[in-house]
Image (tube, rainbow, N blue to C red):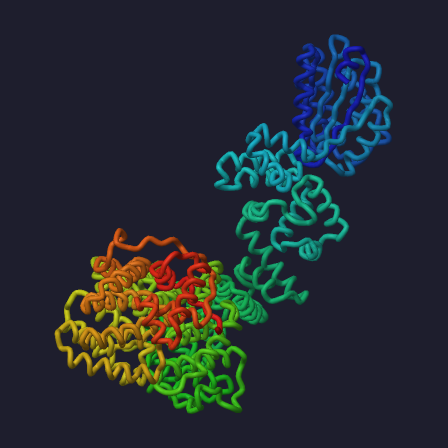
Amino acid sequence: MLDGALAGEGAIATVCGAVAMGRTTLLADFTRRVRAAGGLALPAVASESEENIPLGVIAQLLAEAPLSESAREQADQLLAHGRAHMTGMPDGPVTRLSAVDAQIVHHLSLLLLGLAPARPVAIVVDDIHHADVASLTCLAYLGRRIRNTAVVAVFSHSDGPGDRCAGFVEQSLRLPHARGIRLTPLDAEQVREVVTDRLGEDCAQWAAGWALRVSGGNPLLLDGALSDVQGAGQSSTGYQRAFLSCLRRTPAPATQVVRALAVLGAPERISRLLGLEAGEVAHCLATLEAAGLLNQGAFRHPDAAAAVLADLGPEATAALQREAAELTYAEGCPASVVAAHLLAGEGVRAPWAMSVLDSAAATVLAEGRPATAAEYLRLACRLSEDKGELARIRAALLLAERRLGTTVPEQRVTDLVQAVRTGRLSGGETLGVVRALLWSGRVRAAEDVLRHLAASDRAATADAPLELDAARLWLRCSYAPLLELLPDGTDDTDDGQEPSGVPSTTESRRRYNAVSALESVLTPGPSGRAVPKAEQVLHGSRLHGTDLDTIECALLTLTYADRPALASPHCDELISSAESRGERGSAARLHAVRAEICVRLGDLAGAVRHSSAWFDLVPPDEWGMAVGAPLASKLIALTAMGREDEATELLYVPTQEAMLQSRPGLHYLHARGRYSLAMRDWHSALSDFQHCGELMARWGVDVPGLIAWRNDVGETLLGMGERDRARAVLEEQARCTERGGSPRTRGATLRLLAATYEPRKRLVLLRQAVDALQESGDRYELARTLADLTDTYHAVGETRRARVIGSQARIVADACEAEPLSRLLPSDGDRPDSESPAPGVVLTDAEQRVADLVALGHTNSEIAKMLYITVSTVEQHLTRMYRRMGVNDRTQLATSLFTGAHRETVKA
C-alpha cells in the first residue's frame, strides 16, 4: 500500500480482529514506516466516549495535518458548521445528505486530499467502530475518491462491529482499491517463538504449551502470563491486568457475561441471571472465545475469575452472588451449589436459606471439606432468627470446628450449654457436644450438659438409645468419673452386642461397635471379638464419612489389644487423608494415637515425631484433657532415648488437674513415673505408678493392655533393692497377663521377673521373654531383654553367647535410638560383620524354630535336644537358611532375625 501511494495509487485497508490481537500495534508500525519513507501520516483514535461528538475523528486528522493559515481557518469553520448541522445523524450508512451537510463533507475531504500532491498521505484510524457518524460519512466520501491519488486509508475495527460501523466497513470493502486484513491469534509455533525470546530455550520446553493454553494466542494475555513467569511466578497480577484490559475493550454485554460466568462457574444459566436473550449471550461467548479470554465457556487461567470479581467490587459481586443463589435455588440445584452462592453473597434472608445451608454443610462435611462446612454453618448462625434452629446449627458447627482444630469461642460454649438447659438440642446432638467439650478440656461445661440431659426426657428420644449406650461406654473408657452423671442406658448386653430393637443410623451402629470393642479390651473379661470388630470398623471407614470418635476408638482397640502393627497402616492412611483435607483437629488426634502405637512398637523417634505433630497442630488454649496422651508418649520416648533435658521440659507443660481423671491422664501418670524411674527418683516413680493403678482399679479398667503398671512398680522396687516385694508384684502381673494373653506385657513381665532369680533360672525366663517380645513387635523392650540376657550369659560364664546376643541387642537398641541402652552394649567395632540379608524371605515353621534358638545363642546339639530332632537336621535347616537369606554364619542369621526382616513363616 505504501509503495502504491508513492506511485500515486490510493488504497483502503480495513484491519479487523478480536480484542488485543495487535490491531493498534500494526497501525502504529505502519504509521512509523510512512513517516520513515517521507510520507505524511495522519493518525486518529476513535473512542467510545466521543461517539456522539460530530466530526470528532476528522478533527483529530486535521489537527495532525500541516495546513496553511488560511486552510486551518477554513478547517475550523467547516468543523464548527459541521458540529452545528450534523448533530443527531442516525446510526448506519447515510444514503442522502442535506445540501449543507454534503458541502461540509465535500470541503473537509478536499482539505485532506489537498495534502497529497506534496507527498504521500496515510490516514490511519484505530478503533473506527467507535467513530461518530459524521466522521464515518466523511471518510466514506473520501475513500471513494482516493484511488488515483497518493492517499492511503487504514481503518481498524473489532470483530462484529456495531450497526454504526458495519455499513461503513461493508461499503469500503466493495471498492476495487480496498482490501480486508484479519488478525488471528498466535498459533503454537508463534507462541513458542515469543516464549523462547522472553524466557530462553530451556524454559520454552515446558512453558510454551502452558502459555498457549492460558493465552489462547492472544498477544496481550501472553505478555501478561510471561511477565508473571519472569517475576518468579509469585503472583498472576500480570495476567490478571492483561485480562481486565482485554475485557474493558469488549462491548458491555460481553463484560456482563464474563462477570456472570465468574459467579456461576458455567455458562448455562447466564441468560437467566442477566435477563438477556440466549442468542445474545451465545454471541458474547463466541466473541470472548475468539479473543482468547475463554475456552469452551470456561476461563483459561484459574485466577481470571477472581480478577473479574475483584474488578467488579465486593458489593456488586455480593449482589450478583445473591441473585445467583436465588436463581439456583429456584431451579432446584443441589444445596451445596446454592450454599456456595449464599456464602459468597453473605446470605439471603429467605425462609429456604437456613435449610439449604444446613443440608450443604452436612454434604460437604461428608465429602471431607469441614472448613467449607464450618463456613456454611457460621453464615447460618448469622442469619438464623429461630433459637432452636440456632442451637442445632451451633452444635453442628462445634463438631466441624473440632475436626479443623480451631479455637472455639467461649461464648458459643455458653450458648450451647444454655441450649441444652432450654431443651433445644436432641439427645444425640447433646452427646456430640459433650464429647467435643471434654476433648477441649471444658469439663465443667460437659458436666453441666450431662446433668441437664439426665434431668430431661431427651435421653429417651428416638435418636438417643444407641447413642446413649455408646456415650456411656465411651465415658467409661475415657472419662470414667463422669459416668455417674449420665442416665442409665442399656449397656448390659453380652460382649458389646448392639441392643436389639433399637432404631439407629449406620453411623450410630458403627460408633457403638467401635466403642464397645474398646470397652471390652479395657475391662476385665472376654474380649475375643474386639479386634475383628475394630478391624471391620476401620476397613469400612473413610475419614470424611465416619465420625472421628468412632475411628479413634477402633484404632485404640487394636493398640490396647496388643495389635499396634495392625493399627499402624490404618492410622497412617487416615493421617494423610486428614492433612490433605486441612483437618488439623482430626490430624492431631490421629497423630496422638500414632504416637502411642510407636511407643508400643519401640519406635521411639516415631513417637517423638507424631506427638510433636500434635502440639504443632493444636493451639494451647485447646489442649484440654487430650494433651495427656501425646504428652505421655513424648515423655516416655525422650526418656528412653536419653534426651533428659527435653523430657524435663515436658514436665512443665501446663495441664488441667481434671486431666488426671481421664484415660489420657493415666498415660501421663505412667510416663511421669517412667521419667522419675530413669532419674532414679524411686519414691516419685512408685507414687505415680501406684496412683495410676488405683485409678485403673477404681474405674474398672485394670488391664495390662492399657498400662501394665505392676511391671513398673516391680521395676521400681528392684531399683530400691526390694527384690521380694518386686517378685510378688510381678508374679501378680504375670497372672494377669496369662488371662489377657498380651505377648508384649508377658515379655516385659518375664524380663523383670528374671531379675528376681539367680542367673541360671534367669536365663530360662529371659529366653521366654525374647520369644514373647519378638512376637509383639516391641523393639525397645526386646532390646532391653537382649541386654539383660547378655549380662546373664556373662554372669554364667558363657562369653561367646554373651558376645553374640550383646551384638544383637546393640543393633536393636540403635534402631530404636535408645542411646542410654546402646551405651551399655558392645560398640560398632565389636559387632560381627554382616551384610543386609535379602528381604522377603519366608521361613517354614521348622526353620523358624531353629532360627529363633540360634538367635538365642544355643549350639546345634542343644537345639537338636530341645526340638527332638537330629543335629544333622539342624545343620540342614541352617544351610538352607544361610543360602536363602544371603548370610554367611549364625551371627549374621541372628542379626537378620532380631532386626525383624524375616518373621514371616509358612507351615512346614
Question: Which residue is situated farthest in the top direction here?
Answer: 118
The mark tally for this picture is 0
Q: At 43% from the left edge and 87% from the top edge, which residue is drawn? A: 495
Residue 549 occupies quadrant: bottom left
Image coords of residue 9 (percent x, y): 82, 14
Q: At 62% from the left edge and 59% from the top edge, which residue is drawn? A: 323
Residue 748 occupies quadrant: bottom left
Residue 650 placement, left or right of 428:
left
> Which one is nearer the viewer's eye here, 285 or 863?
863
Q: At 67% from the left edge and 43% from the top edge, which residue is drawn? A: 252
Image coords of residue 616 (percent x, y): 35, 58
Classify 443 as above or below 130. below
Q: Quadrant of the N terminus?
A: top right
> Which one is nearer the viewer's eye here, 143 or 586?
586
Residue 77 placement, left or right of 724:
right
In this rendering, does residue 430 appear at all? no
Image coords of residue 501 (percent x, y): 53, 91
Residue 576 placement, left or right of 722:
right
> Which one is nearer the viewer's eye here, 612 or 85?
612
Image coords of residue 882 (percent x, y): 42, 60
